[in-house]
Image (cartoon, rainbow, N blue to C red):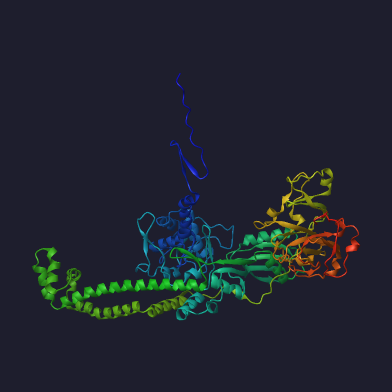
Amino acid sequence: MKKSTPKKQPPKKQHNDAYIEGSGTVVAKDIVSTLEENYMPYAMSVIVSRALPEIDGFKPSHRKLLYTMYKMGLLSGARTKSANIVGQTMRLNPHGDAAIYETMVRLARGNEALLHPYVDSKGNFGKAYSRDMAYAAARYTEAKLEGISAELFAEIDKDAVDMVPNYDNTMLEPSLFPVRFPSVLVNSNFGLAVSMASNICSFNLTEVCETTIAMMKDPEHDPLTTLKGPDFPGGGYIVYDEAEMRKVYNTGLGAIKVRAVYNYDKDARCIEVTQIPPSTTVEAIIDKVVELVKDGKLREISDVRDETDLSGLRLAFDLKKGNDPDAVMQKLFKLTPLQDNFNCNFNVLIAGTPRVMGVREILTEWIEFRRQCVRRRVYFDLQKKKEKLHLLLGLKKILLDIDYAIKVIRETEEEAEVVPNLMIGFGIDELQAEYVAEIKLRHINREYILKRTQETDDLEKEIAEMEDILADTKKISRLIIDELRDIIKKYGQPRRTMFLYDVAEIEAEVEEELPKAYPVNLFFTREDYLKKITPQSLRMSNQQKLKEGDEIIYQREVSSNAELLFFTDKYQCYKSRCLDFDETKASVMGDYVPAKLGLDEGESITFMAVTESYKEQLVIFFKNGKCAKIPLSSFETKTKRKKLANAYSDLSEVVGMFVTDGEADFVLKSSAGKVLVFNTALVLPKSTRDTQGVQVMRLTKAELTGAYLLQNSDLKNPEDYRIKTIPSAGSVSGKDISQLSLF
């Protein structure tokens, strides 16, 4: 009988391996190369071709839209339907109409997102300060280019920038705009790429141009002296901080604090907000105010309304009788986005590479970019004038004998020989001969030819001037400066955002109305699990569920409004409240505190303190024999800070931490077998959290190995070991001391 052979099984898939179906082979696939091949091209495409602005101040989507509008002739003339513009833009931008139209909305005057809009709009384009005010569909709105857009395209047809093929290689589009002013700083720009972002605030056009001029004259010029600060389209007040402003100018990173503008109608007892920070919306402010009123944290306001209309933004807050409007606004600044930070991140693409730059560096890059544009423009004009001069010089030679030129043409039998015969007859090249041969019959009179030849003198002067400009960087800079001054005259406008100087930090923390307190039982385990159980639940079932090998090291009945302090081995203290933990049952493991509080990686809890009034004191014993007594009030903060650094000294290892209500007796034990008993009244309190304290146990070639509350130790005859002064070496004990409680 024939023996059957078992069917061969394909090999099992391994981690990072790819099984090729039907081949019986497995090809190892390295995860690093997989990411490089599949993810990196996408990431780079988003960074370089979509999300980040370049030195001309535009992203590719902006550039494609505006260039399309320019080619449609919308720089002058009547507006056209937005749908027409969106459709035409699809020739350059391979995205859906919704994405293109959304880009156009933000550039439009009606949206009020830009300090100097590039699109003149008609119809409902929504508002940048409103989250819910939707813009109308593209078929209903109309648009054309604003006058300032002429400064984007003035030299685009003079080879000032590179032209590249569009996505289907059917037409050319500019890689950058030859902008005549630093638009990268004049209009705000936000972009979210892969692993990086950009957030550039807007600055006043006049101040930006004046700063650029000053830097071109003096490279060491301090931009902060002429560029006072950002100028937001929605106005507002900047709470001026010179150190933070200088940080933004130098590094491109930092936070600018912006505050709303308001006035008070005394008769109506109503606060009217007319300008808000650029990083928020009307709806976000109203939602936050409503939430605060419902939570009982904002009792001074009886009503809030959005009264925005065609005249502009207006938020109304009705006050209850007897409330000071300025005090209420201070509270609103503290608790709502009526005061908010604009987080700067000046990330700009320079030659295809993302760079976070300060104002000086951005303007330096723009000046160099603009010099290249002007140099290319002048060179383009120079070549055109040289070509024209070359033709006119050929015409000048014809002037010597017009009749002979006519005779040469008439006696030439074949049309193809006309140009060669003129070249031979007058010693001119083919281009010049073609130009002469194409002169109309009406223009062969002497007057016309004399006028044309007289242009040669002017052309030679202009060519000489252009060659001088190309050879002298200072002359190129002078041209740029003249253009910037002209732009200031045409488009400059007063600042919309003003400054508040010497404003005191709002420190008054609004008191939160805590719920009525009730008793709860806290259980904390060695593995950092915390349970909050009500007495009723504990009476029903007190069988505690714990992780294998875990044990309860802290158990106490406290108020539900108590605060919890968790000290870690990284010398940090994490603050929390009983209210932050859900009530649970004994039959569950509870909350894992490191995850709940967001401890740093590798950080573990060494001690937990519970307080309701911060009237207790924290007693810390260190391995070097020192003791620190710190009022627990040193850990109380006016703000809701969750993490306190340098919570205790890191100069010596901690042997024990204790919270005491008043003075307490402690037993200390050294590695030399000595023991002492002392009262904490011998140690003076220190308000500095990371104090090392004072020497309590004098150690010689030994270290402190144990610290215990006297009532929790099994030391017999403790008075035999009590000391009256510190430091002390202690006495030798014949009996080991066991620790009965950690907390």
Left-right relation of 386 to 625: left
Give x and y (percent) for residue 709.
84, 59
Give x and y (percent) for residue 73.
39, 64
Q: Relative to 536, does residue 459 appear above or below in the rendering?
A: below
Q: Across the whole image, how many numbered discs are drawn on residues?
A: 0
Q: Relative to 626, does residue 533 appear above or below in the rendering?
A: above
Left-right relation of 212 to 740: left
The quadrant of the rendering that contains the C terminus is: bottom right
**Res 233 visible:** no
Q: Nearer the viewer, residue 506 or 72?
A: 506
Which quadrant holds residue 253? bottom right
Q: Nearer the viewer, residue 544 or 626?
A: 626
Which quadrant holds residue 249? bottom right
**Res 129 visible:** yes
Which quadrant holds residue 603? bottom right
Give x and y (percent) for residue 684.
82, 71
Give x and y (percent) for residue 323.
75, 69
Q: Nearer the viewer, residue 619 or 457?
A: 619
